Amino acid sequence: MGMDRKIKKKTWTTGRILGIGGGFLLLSLILYSFLFADNRSKLNVDKEKITVSNVKKDIFQEFIPETGIVMPSQTIYLDAVEGGVVKHITLESGALVKVGDTIMTLGNSNLQLDVMNREAQLYEQLNILRTTRLQLDQNDLTQKAQLAEINYQIQLLKPQYERYKELAGKKLISKRDLEEVEENYKYNLRRKELTYKAYMSDSMSRSFQLHQISMSEDRMLRSLDAVGKILNNLVITAPTQGLLTTADWEPGQSITPGERLGQVALLDSFKVRVAIDEIYLPKVDVGQQATFNFDGKDYRLKIYKKYPTVSEGNFEVDMRFMGEVPSGIRRGQSLRIRLELGSSEEAMLLATGGFFRDTGGNWVFVMNNDGSKAYKRDIKLGRKNTEYYEVLEGLEPGEKVITSSYENFGSNEVLVF
C-alpha cells in the first residue's frame, strides 16, 4: 500500500492575483483622484448667453466721452454807451446783419443839450487861442518893423557920420555938428542892439507859446470831434456781420448807460464748448485733442481755452476745429466727442464689459483652447477708456476671455459649455 502524497498549496492563485490587481487599481484611482483630478467647482453654462472677447496688443488711448455744444467762435456784445429812450427799432432779434446796419435808435434831449453846450464852450476856447495867436504874430511883426526902421536909420546915419567926421578933420564944419550926427548914429546902434535882444527873447517865448497853443488847438479839435460823435452813440449799429440776438425792446422803453442790448454772433466760424466733470480738472489742459463723428466722417478738435472756474461740479473748455470744419454744422448742435487724456501707446487690451462690476477687474474666466471650458484666473488691469481696459498682468494676446456679466456664475471656478 502506497503512502499518500501531500499536495503543495499554490501561493499566487488566479483569484488572488485578480484581487490584488483590482485593489491596486482602486487605490491608484483614489490616489489619482486625490492628487491629479480637477476638483474645482463647476457650472454648466449656455455658450449662447455669454460674450467672449479676444485679448490683443494694440494702441491704447485713454479718453473720456463728453458732449460738446457748437457755438460761434466769437460773439460781440451790444451795450448802450449812452442812455436814452427807444425811438425806433430797425432790426429785430434773429436778423442777419452786416457791418454798420442800424439796429435801433435812441433819443436823449438832455444829452443833445449837453453836447451843444460843450461844443459852444470848445468853440469859445478855440477863438481865445486863435486871438492869442494873432496877437503874438502881430507883436512879432511890430518888433520886426522896429528893427527894420532902426536899420534904415543906421544906413542913413553911417555915411553921414563918416562924411562929417572927415569934414571936421578939415575944419570945414563945427565940432557941434559932428557930435550931433555921432550921437544920433551911436544911439541907433545901441537901440538896434537892445531891440534885437528883446526880439530874440520874445521870439523864444513866442515860439513856446505858439507850440502850446497848437497843442491846445489839436486837443480841442479832437474833443470837438469826440463831442460831435457822442450823439452817434444813440444810433445802435452792427459791429460785425452775423446773427443778431436782442431782447424784446419796445419804442418808448428807457435804457440806462452800459445796459446790455443784445449780441451779434459770427456765423462763418465755430467753436465747441464742453462741460467736463471736475475730477478731470488736473488731467485736462490747453492743447489736448478730441475726436467726433459727424455724418459718417471723423473730425478732430483741440482745446485752446480752459475755464478753471468750477460750477455745479463741472468746468468748461473751448475747442476749435483742426483742419476741415463739417459742412452743415449748426449753432447749438450737440456733438458726442472723445476727449483724449494722455498720449497713445501700445498695450495689452481687453474689451470692457459687465464682468468688471462682479470682479473689480481682479479676475476673469479664460477659455481653454477647444472652447469647451473656461477657468477662473487672477489678472491685473490698469487704465480704461470706453472700449478697452489696459491689461497689466495675467493674460496673453490671443486668449479668449468672458467679458459679459458674471452675476449668475456664483463662486464656481470652472465653466463647462
Image (cartoon, grey):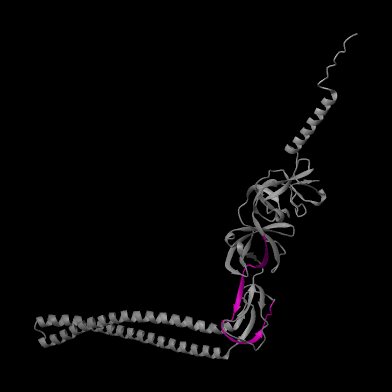
In the picture provided, is 307 more to the left or to the right than 299? Answer: left
- Picture coordinates of residue 10, whole percent (x, y): 83, 19
Q: Is residue 14 left or right of residue 291?
A: right
Q: Residue at x 80, y 28 (%)?
A: 20
- Residue at the far front: name it: 1
- Magenta residues, dominant SS class: strand
- Asked whether 82 falls inside the magenta stretch, the response is yes
State the residue in front, 331 or 119: 331
- Residue located 78% across and 54% down the image: 408
- Observer-nearest residue: 398 or 365? 365
Whether residue 243 can be seen here: yes
Most distant residue in the right direction: 1
* Residue 396 image-quadrant placement: top right
Whether residue 239 appears in this view of the structure is no
Q: Is residue 312 above or below residue 197?
A: above
* Quarter of the image where one finds residue 245: bottom right
Say if 81 sits above or below 19 in the image: below
The picture places residue 21, in percent across and down from the top left corner, at: 81, 28
Q: Looking at the picture, does residue 357 appear above or below residue 34? A: below
Hey, which quadrant is residue 167 in on the image? bottom left
Count of numbered tags: 0
* Residue at the outermost top position: 1
Q: Position of residue 95 (x, y in %)?
A: 69, 76
In the picture, the quarter occupied by the N terminus is top right
Residue 284 magenta-highlighted = no
Along the line of sight, the residue nearer the viewer: 272 or 233: 272
Q: Where does residue 321 sit, x and y in percent of width and height?
A: 64, 61
Q: Which residues are magenta?
A: 65-93
Identify the residue at horizontal 82%, vertical 28% (top origin).
Answer: 19
